Amino acid sequence: MSEKLLMKGNEVIAEAALRAGCKHYFGYPITPQTEVAHYMAKKMPEINGTFVQAESEVAAINMVYGAAAAGARVLTSSSSPGISLKQEGISYIAGAELPCVIVNIVRCGPGLGGILPAQCDYFQAVKGGGHGDYKMVVLAPSSVQELYELTVESFNIADRYRICTMIMGDGMLGQMMEAVEFKAREEIYHDDKKWATTGTKMQRESNNVTSIYINPEVLEKHNLKLQAKYRQIEQNEVRVETYNCENADIIVTAYGTVARIIKNVIKSAEKEGIKVGLIRPVTLWPFPTAAFEKYAETPKAFLSVELSAGQMVEDVRLAVNGKCPVHFYGRMGGMVPSQKEILNKIKEILK
């Protein structure tokens, strides 16, 4: 039977990771995601797992590299500036094709910023914040229930493709409490991980996990292999929610916390005779381009609403490809737009 509990978002991420078979957590405290580490510190000893509060974010991500190379399901979590410090290690992990899950509960910036909700790390997450031609799968939940479901799925995706996956939320989603229904049993993808550095026991050749390729022909071949894998992921792992888009006057696109606000805006707009649709990317990468292409000529305009100065809107414009005007509305610094603000923006565009 399933189990329904009232839990905080950050704690749900940690519980979901445990249910997905994660027994290793390495991190460093930073608000507004510290409850992930608190929960893991309490639970890991109960399952004979590993919890390490590292001396820094740099140390934590390199511990992730080590555990992932040994074939373990491993998690790290942080918030914006902490994720920035992990970028070199993330690139190394991507280059070595190691599966792991990274949580970013975004805070507003730039710089140290503040702990209030923001979506200003979109570029960093989907464009590859570290060096080199690499990608991460980036999942953007919009509820505590989705935090659970997508965290479990992120471990499956990571193992299936030997790739980093990121759960990207914000300070509001991490701190809010909602009812979450846990399954009695998770669907776990099992991989034999014959590539892992688990010791030969004198019965096989040594495995070598690295991202160093001195020979340019070999390095190019490795990069081409990575790019082919990314194209496969683009074919298989896109997740998107579309709502009320048929014959819409305007289609709003938003992800995470902001998408929750848009659903109420849709109800308010309907009372005034305005049909508003919603395209909610659940995977920020791979981006759901096909959903935008499908409706590119349906509305009078698109509107991207974000907690940033305008980041996802660039991918929306690429996806729409000039077939329809694309507008932007954003708030920054931890300010969250109200339903009235967004509805007024919609009316202004449709005028």
Image (cartoon, rainbow, N blue to C red):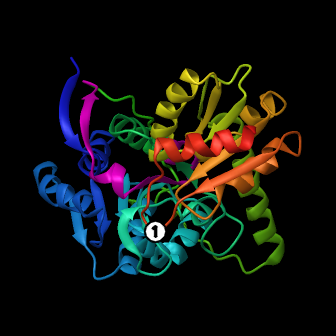
Q: Residue at x 57, y 39 (%)?
A: 343
Residue 162 location (% of width, % of height): 55, 51
**Whole-percent x and y of residue 324?**
84, 40
- Amino acid type assigned to the residue bearing label 1 in the image: Gly
Expressed as whole percent of the image width and height from the top left, the position of residue 202 reads: 42, 61
Tell me if residue 302 comes above or below residue 101 in the rendering.
above
| Label 1 environment density (alpha carbons within 10 Å; few <14, some 14–19, many ≥20) | some
Question: Is label 1 in a helix, a strand or a loop?
Answer: loop
Q: Residue at x 68, y 24 (%)?
A: 245
Look at the image and give the residue range highlighted in magenta. 157-184
Does 253 sit left or right of 103 as displayed? Answer: right
Residue 113 shown left or right of residue 253 in the figure: left
Is residue 332 magenta-colored?
A: no
| Mark 1, residue position | 333
Residue at x-position 71% and y-position 25%: 248
Q: Is residue 186 visible?
A: yes
In terms of depth relative to the viewer, which is nearer, 271 or 117? 271
